[in-house]
Image (spheres, grey):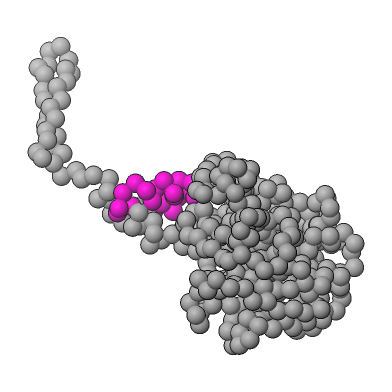
Amino acid sequence: MDMTRRVTRNQNDDVASSSMTIKTDDVGPWSYLNDDVLLLVMMQLGVIDFVAFSGVCKSWRSVALRNRKSFMASKPPMLTRICGDLNKNKKFRVDDHEGRKFKTIIPHSADWHYQRLTSCYLILFRWTTKEYWLVNPITRHELIFPPIPWKTDYDSRSVLVFSPSISKSVFVVLAHSQIWFSIEDEGTWNHVSSFDLEFCRDLHLFKGKIYTIDTNNFNLCEFRLNPEPKVTLLETKNLPDDPEILFPQLVSCGENLYLMGSSVYAEKFNVFKLDFGEMEWVHFEDTRDECGFFLSEENYSAAVKPELWADPWSHYEAYDIDNGGEHEKILFSAIRGWYFPHECENVNLIEES
């Protein structure tokens, strides 16, 4: 459509009015913006604004989907909160470091109990049917796993992994001194029993293998799914003997595996790195490693290199790593839990040889 606009202006009393015509017939809608320009704009957004950006139109959504992994990888952790009792649908909320909030309702979740997070998936459990339901509140991808054959408890630990050989997700749960696992869409559970799992807590995927930590002596147990399910005890030396490690969690950063622990009231924190060559735990202060630890006692924790989100770290309340010697404020604690956008698009691949 040929559109013109006439603007009349009076410059001085002795100057006659003049007019100019601006042709705007070559101005297109916002959806016609160049993809490179859209990408530059998108990468400046926060996760909350990204969700809105991807819903503007088809072309904007296309740019968002193609670049979602790189976008998420550039965003720092966000605080999470799950609201709603058993009679109401769960409300998922995340707050970014700038105070912006994203809220969404998880449909059909009224009778589901929220347990924790794994790789950006909310782990929900229904007491009536004994089923697990995993849903990613950002991507909306979801998985349903069959009723469990073991007695339910609140202390079960779990991790979602992906098997390249069968191209399916596998949900692994540590419960009652056994490791249970269910393959996506197969509708069954299998398990591996081992005396070594009696005092084990936590499950963590590191370099394609699943590890759990023995809270009695801080030895590792390695779980392999293929070629056949198996648990192997990995004895370690220089075991941490600090009685304050009451909530041990395994986290990893790059090529390193760490053990994190805190006191009951999160007043004291300890971090140890495993030297796989010597199979011994090393105090973090002796490693010269540079990374930040994001701890959540009831949810999902992680270790992250500082260069990933160097600037936004100043927005978090930091705590000391109490391994003795000089303390550095590199630990960030949140009872509510952390949500890590950079893991939203990651696939937890398990090693299959």
Tell me if I can see residue 257 in this picture: no
Screen quadrant of the N terminus: top left
Residue at 90% from the left image edge and 68% from the top image edge? 241
Q: Compare residues 233 and 3 and report the one nearer the observer.
A: 233
Residue at 87% from the left image edge and 76% from the top image edge? 238
- Asked if residue 81 is positioned above or below residue 346 in the image, the reply reads above
Is 6 positioned to the left or the right of 81 in the image? left
Is 132 positioned to the left or the right of 53 in the image? right
Residue at 14% from the left image edge and 30% from the top image edge? 5
- Quarter of image, res 35: bottom left
Q: Secondary structure of the magenta portion, mostly?
A: helix
Residue that lies at the very extreme toward the top in this rendered image: 13
- Quarter of image, res 117: bottom right
Screen quadrant of the C terminus: bottom right
Whole-percent x and y of residue 285? 80, 65
- Asked if residue 233 is positioned above or below residue 69 in the image, the reply reads below
Q: Compare residues 311 and 73 and report the one nearer the observer.
A: 73
Q: Compare residues 142 and 259 and report the one nearer the observer.
A: 142
- Quarter of image, res 249: bottom right
Residue at 70% from the left image edge and 79% from the top image edge? 192
Is 166 positioned to the left or the right of 231 in the image? left
Is 40 positioned to the left or the right of 137 in the image? left
Whole-percent x and y of residue 341? 54, 57
Whole-percent x and y of residue 307? 59, 61
- Tally the marks: 0
Whole-percent x and y of residue 303? 67, 63
- Asked if residue 249 is positioned above or below residue 166 in the image, the reply reads above
Question: Is residue 54 a member of the stretch shown in magenta?
Answer: yes
Magenta-tinted stretch: 40-60
Tell me if I can see residue 319 in this picture: yes
